[in-house]
Amino acid sequence: MFGFKKNSNKLTYDKSTEVPVIKSSICTGEKTAGFMEINGGRYRDVMLIKTDSDIEEFKKMCGVEEIKTIY
């Protein structure tokens, strides 16, 4: 759906302009993982989050310990 292969080991993104985030819908609770631009706030979807293990997998692929959730 998002053009992302779950078996990939690392995601590449520009750390100076983007941060990894989890976007959660207030109405439905659906969660997606992606990147948000630091200056513009534009969000880019990468993968659908179905379980907590998906969040952990996304953290590993980005190489981060903590991920901010946006609504």
Image: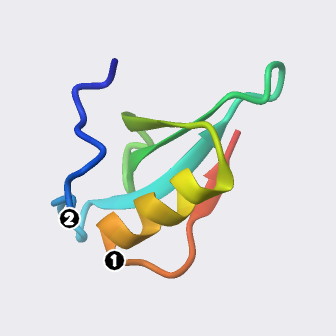
Picture residue at 83% right of the left edge, 20% below the top: 27
Q: Quadrant location of the N terminus?
A: top left
Mark 2 or mark 1: name the one nearer the start of the chain: 2
Q: Is mark 1 on a helix, strand or loop?
A: loop
Type of amino acid under label 1 = Gly
Near-viewer residue (43 or 32): 32
Q: Is residue 68 above or below residue 71?
A: below
- Name the residue carrying label 1: 63
- Disc 2 + disc 1, Cβ < 8 Å: yes
Q: Is residue 51 above or below residue 61?
A: above
Type of amino acid under label 2 = Lys
Q: Is mark 2 on a helix, strand or loop?
A: loop
Residue lying at the far right in this picture: please name it: 27
Picture residue at 69% right of the left edge, 28% below the top: 30
Q: Is residue 32 above or below residue 39?
A: above
Res 9 → quadrant: bottom left
Residue 2 shows which numbered tag? none
